[in-house]
Amino acid sequence: MELREELRQLAPFCALTFITGTATAISAYWVIYFNQIGLSFTQISFMLALASIAPMIFEVPTGAVADALGRKISVTAGFFLVGIATIAVAFSDSFYYLAGILFFSAAANTLQTGAFDAWIVDYAKSLKRTTVHSALSKTRSFAFAGAFISLVASSFITAQYGIKMLWIFSGAAMAVAGVYGYLFCPENFSRRQIHVSMLRHSISASVKGAKYALTHRVLKYILAVTVITAFFGVWQIAWQPLFVEVGVPLPHIGIIFAALMLVAIAFSALSPRFKALFGTDRRALIAGEIISGILFASVLFVSSSLQSAALFLLLGAIGSMTNPIYESYFHKFVPSPQRATISSFKSWLSNGAGIIAVLAGGLAMDTIGPRMTMAALSVLVIPTILLYLRIDDGRGSR
């Protein structure tokens, strides 16, 4: 009975996250689409890099908007604007138009990043029959369900109407989410004034957190690993064209990405066992790097649809097991009062390195092809392993 009542109270947000989940339909095909309309991988990577810059510029200002005007108006406006921008992608093949649209979409998306979870948390705290953890867990489960269904559906939409229709489908889902959230999702939030002094304090705290992390005996090495592993992000633009190269039918790609979601959930649950197998966080992370390096190198020998799908899922499985270990290891050395600022600095470093990586990856793909570019990523495990070996695996590593 309590579970039923909890779901009844959370129903508006469960429905909202399900709708936003369905907007991921295009995620399995966007690189292929841009390549099909005549854009080079260098141009595609430039658009992605430009979109990645937007959050670095707008994250703090839009966060202030959410704090001043309310999470509801900020989040739903973000959803709606992203939806309209996503639909607009389908109506031009101009590189400059698309670059501008993707930058705008990424900027608008900062209206909901962080604020969406804060909205759910504020609402959950006002309820008597749920906890914050339970509310976030259940709403994210509905988001996963929406994403899984949309990825499966993307295969059928692609087969019947082509990839362009996925932009319209995904954009419409986000726009509907914005309207639905504004009309039907309640808000429990007290607006507050944002002063310049608060922003100055935030910047000062961020600088102090960055200095602490860069001089810490362990964190400096973990942050260096973060920068290097950001280059593995190249696989987000390399896998889709690799699937096409080895002859994977377009409708099957959506199914493969849907399978990746199931693999990620299953293997993230195995993360504690993976760590226990090697005894410590550091050893488990080194093992994960070695396995990843072997898998990336093995792309040179992929010659069929089945082999490429299996390799894709294996890499997803390894990442799903090692990511929780990495995050846990990182936070064991971060003091609680500076946790938010140091985590933000880590994200900033990862995003900055990721921008460089994507630009380099696009150029490499145009020069040596997706397959060789993916294989070259295997070399990066060498410096990451050496960095992990420099860490004193003492207190806080188990």
Image (spheres, rainbow, N blue to C red):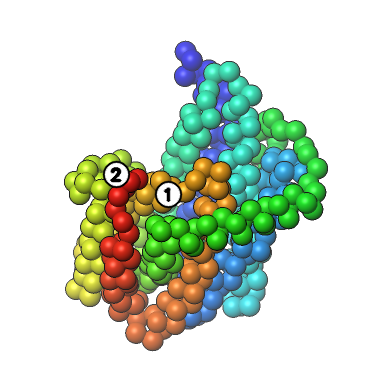
Q: Callout 2: 10 Å neighbours few (<14), some, many (20+)?
A: some
**Residue 243 in view:** no
Indicate which disc, 2 or 1, sits on the residue closer to the N terminus. Answer: 1
Q: Which mark is residue 333?
A: 1
The answer to whether residue 334 of the structure is visible from this angle is yes
Give the image location of residue 172, x and y in percent: 60, 51
Tell me the kind of residue under disc 2: Arg
Quadrant in which residue 158 is drawn: bottom left
Name the residue rendered at 48%, 62% in the picture: 215
Q: Which element is circle 2 on?
A: loop
Residue 87 screen position, x and y as percent: 61, 60
Q: Residue at x 32, y 59 (%)?
A: 391
Question: In x, y percent, where is residue 86?
Answer: 60, 60
Q: Nearer the viewer, residue 235 or 321?
A: 321
Left or right: 361 as drawn, with respect to 186: left
Please report the residue visible at 23 percent of the width from the left and 72 percent of the height from the top. 297
Confirm or deny contact between disc 2 and disc 1 (CB under 8 A). no
The image quarter containing residue 141 is top left
- The front one of 194 and 291 is 194
- Extreme-bottom residue of the structure: 367
Tell me if 99 is positioned left or right of 154 in this view: right
From the image, tell me which residue sits under label 2.
Answer: 398
Amino acid type shown at disc 1: Phe
Q: Which of 388 and 53 lies nearest the eye of the viewer?
A: 388
Q: Secondary structure at mark 1?
A: loop
- The image shows residue 121 at horizontal and vertical percentages of 59, 33
